[in-house]
Amino acid sequence: MRTQVEDISAVKKRLVVEIDAAEVDNELSAAYKRLGKTTKLPGFRPGRIPRGVLESYFGNQVKEDVARNLINNTISEALNEARTFPIGAPILEKDDLKPGQMFQYSAVLEVRPVIELPEYEGLEVGKEILQVTDQDVENQLERIRQGNGKLETIEEDRAVGSGDYVVVDYEVYDGEALVEGFGASDAVIKVGAHEFDADVEEALIGMQKGGEKGVTVHFGEHHPRVDLAGKDVLFKVRVKELKTLVLPDMDDAFVEGLGADFKSVDELKAKIGQEIRTAEERRIDQELKQRLIEKIAEKVDVELPPVLVESELQMRIENLKQSLKRSGADPEQAGLTDERMKVDLRPVSEKRVKNMLILGDIAREKGLKVGEEDLEEQFASLAASTGQDAAILRKYYEARELLDGLRQQLLEEKTLKYLVEHARISDVERSVLTGNAAK
């Protein structure tokens, strides 16, 4: 067997494999011998059928089978010999197999690109200063209070005002045509909250119970409903009820009623403060790591393997679809076709693949690996956060072949941690990082 590697691009290669005629003939002879033992033909005893007769009946199929077996039996060795390691299924091309002749096939492979890593140790990067204020705690307390409020009907015969909750039926029209799947019955809109369309909320102010109104709304060019983007659409709205949100008093009795083993407002405040700090520490750490890898990535110019980009893109599309379905939305009705999502999500998918390749090369260069202890620690952490047994969680991952993905995730985290440990970090205000610092 002889192998040769041809470069197609930085991420594509063609592996050409040649198999000697002698090996081809041996494989053909063995195939016909096996076939002769099991084949029954009129006028011949089993095992006594001449090869020429077998060739006349089964020649094409035998040559196809032998060619396939030769490829399957040699491809791994050929890849190792050529020191070429594909990151996706190779595309095979083969010549016709003929007795007494050398057999040649080729495999077009996508491979990891060779990355010239820039200096990645000692990078200067800003880390946001953790700031959790009393007002942050109070805001979360108020959200809890709002979430436990009760909507009560306003019996007074009055007009809708800002801050009112309005129960409406509405339909949406594109010209004269009703837009299916867009309208709703008994929709609750908080006027002035801008959680619905701002023009519709503004138009509700001053309306009375039972009132109807048409509101023309312009949808921007990048509206999620692709079929309506850039158009003026008509909302036909009917007010059915006015409601107000009655809030409970924020006292110890209310806190005890939440059923979370809190006895006082002060206990709840302490817990909220702790949770906010934990969440903020996690966010700050993740954003710091992201800034570090982006500093490295901006200095790397590399062609990305299409197979990795497409895989990442499909995963993001499926995740978005599932997220929408869990929230009760229909991706198609929301205008999120596969084609639209492929366009919208491709840039972030390419960025993710580039970062993944860079982190992988850094990990190899520094000898970073994920061992059994890392996995055990991760499953213990998952068990603590989910309340499930670590061994059961591991079996779940193994049964669904998720361990390799978990190892990849842990290796990336270990590499990012290494970058942080070897960076020159300075503490800065959030406004500096977001570009909102006073000038």
Image: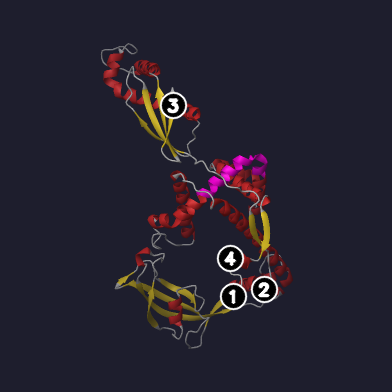
Q: Earlier in the sequence, mark 1 or mark 2?
A: 2
Q: Earlier in the sequence, mark 2 or mark 3?
A: 3
Report the front residue among 121 and 59: 121
Q: Which residue is mark 2?
A: 135
Which residue type carries mark 3?
Answer: Thr
Callout 3–callout 1 Cβ contact below 8 Å: no
**Can residue 369 be seen at all in this image of the molecule?**
no
Give me the residue at 39% from left, 62% from top: 335
Neighbourhood count class around disc 4 (C-alpha, 10 Å): few under 14, some 14–19, many 20 upward: few
Q: Tell me the tag on residue 149.
A: 1
Secondary element under disc 1, as helix, strand or loop, is: loop
Coordinates of residue 413 in the picture (x, y in percent): 62, 49
Mark 1 and mark 2: Cα distance apart in space: 21 Å
Is residue 374 within the magenta segment?
Answer: yes
Q: Quadrant of the C terminus?
A: bottom right
Which residue type carries mark 2?
Answer: Gln
Q: Main secondary structure of the magenta part?
A: helix
Give me the residue at 69% from left, 66% from top: 273
